Amino acid sequence: MIEWVNAVVQGILLGGLYALFAAGLSLIFGVMRLVNIAHGDLIILAAYLGLTTTTMLGVHPFVALLIVVPAMAGIGYVIQRGLLNQTLGPDILPPLLVTFGLSVILQNALLEGYTADPQKLSGGVIETASVNVGGMALGVLPLLTFGIAVAVIAGLQWMFYSTALGRGFRAVSDNQDIAQLMGLNKAHVFGLAMALALAVTAIAGILLGIRTSFDPSIGGGRLIFGFEAVIIGGLGNLWGTLAGGVILGVAQTIGAKIDPGWQVLAGHIAFLVVLAVRPNGLFPRVSH
Amino acid sequence: MPEPLLSLTALDAHYGDFQALFGVDMAIEEGEVIAIIGANGAGKTTLMRSISGLLTNAPEQIKYRGQAIGALRADQVAHLGLALVPEGRQLFPSLSVEENLLLGGKTGRTGPWSLQTVCDLFPILQERRAQASTSLSGGQQQMVAIGRALMSNPDLILFDEISLGLAPVIIKSIYEALPGIIGQGTTAVIVEQDISKALSVSSRVYCLQEGRVSLTGRVEDITRDQITAAYFGVAA
């Protein structure tokens, strides 16, 4: 019995990581209706930037965040202003195609730069440390990941609904023309949204890199988990995205408990069931 | 003669292959209140979109304080002190009443208008400030739309069809608030299908017909028959 409870708890904690994968996707879709196919590869890019920073400076991956988060934010702003803004319009196909192309380019650039060898970020003792809660050993790293996910979602929520920046995001999301009339340059607002999304992606990439090994090809899988968390939770609802990540994580760990080969499949099945029963997700916010 | 606040020179506007404005000339002096009238499809809203920067034109076709603004983006035009109250109110549905007003102040221009003075002008907004903007009545939404434009402390404010779809008693109360706005020294352009309402507050009028200026002059110099002819395009 305790093993099943353990699987559920581990799944919840894993869901925190998936929520971090998903938060950036959710944010940019909410602000500019852009579906970023390269999102998974950007997570992996962040992990590699973390690798370079830790090996060059000899610092802990968490310290590397101080460099990787602003670097990814900068990359996000430049990609948005220089490339993606040109693709946004009434047709949803061009941004899909361009981000797909970006995904291919990123994967190959990472392959050229870092080879196909699996890499890992070394988190030190934190990787194996655990605390005993009611007879269960909970890893400090998964607990920390979940805590960070909750903090990031809460922070994004606060930014969205209580700051002038968030007001601008919501206004541009509602009506780009009228927002422009009010003096907001939507090209800049979109750049800021992508910068913020990729700042979150940087955190997700570093935590991923400490938790598991990575290579240039695994971005696509992270994208799928992120998408599934967003859709399960409901578009445009950040807390829903966290719930979606948790549901996906729990489904995966329970699947793995039944048969280790079922981990990923169980997650996809849970996603399909939610999609069939509640096509708009469990907690949809966007009604149009 | 001093340079006009806003001048249009041979302004053309297109939506793709469709031409909506043909060589429109217009000059608006500081402090004037101008009425722009015309039937549906005459090009009134296109004119507003061109001036406010939502439609891109040749730079020299629109000049504001001598500066060519025809090719500027709408946010750049807004920073220069031009505000548009758009047709159909177009509030931001995910923003509360107060947030809609605050967004109007985004340009950071200073002047007589603030959250407080807008709420003094339309006291009901003070009461409803925390509500979702979509929960208000049409008239109250129009007040938010006007307040939102005022929050940028514009030197020139464009009103596009502010009476459209509103009950007569509401239209009356909104027009009663206009002198309080214009009295602050703001230049105003009022676009209306409701001719008598527009003329009652304006000093000069331009009539548009099929994308061209068909009549212009001081309100007191123009007869009903002239307006009818210019509006509908029938010989009087």
Image (cartoon, coloured by chain):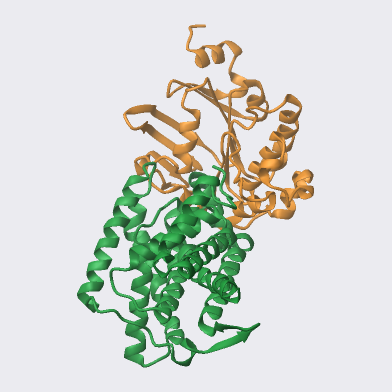
The residue at the far top in this view is B236
Name the residue rendered at 60%, 13% in the picture: B224
Q: Is residue B164 visible?
A: yes
User: What colour is chain A?
Assistant: green
Name the residue rendered at 58%, 18% in the picture: B222
- On the image, the x and y values in percent for residue A103 come to 29, 61
Q: Which quadrant holds residue A9?
A: bottom right
Answer with left or right where residue B10 lies relative to residue A175.
Answer: left
Q: Is residue A45 above or below residue A98?
A: below
Which is nearer the eye, A213 or A89? A213
The image shows a total of numbered marks equal to 0
Q: Is residue A173 above or below residue B228?
A: below
Q: Is residue A185 visible?
A: no
- On the image, the x and y values in percent for residue A144 come to 55, 80
Name the residue rendered at 39%, 88% in the picture: A122
Q: Is residue A219 above or below residue B3?
A: below
- On the image, the x and y values in percent for residue B151 come to 64, 51
Answer with left or right where residue B98 lies relative to residue B155.
Answer: right
The residue at the far left in this view is A112
Which is nearer the eye, A248 or A113? A248
Which is nearer the eye, A247 or A42? A247
- On the image, the x and y values in percent for residue A56 come to 32, 90
User: What colour is chain B?
Assistant: orange
Which is nearer the eye, A85 or A239? A239
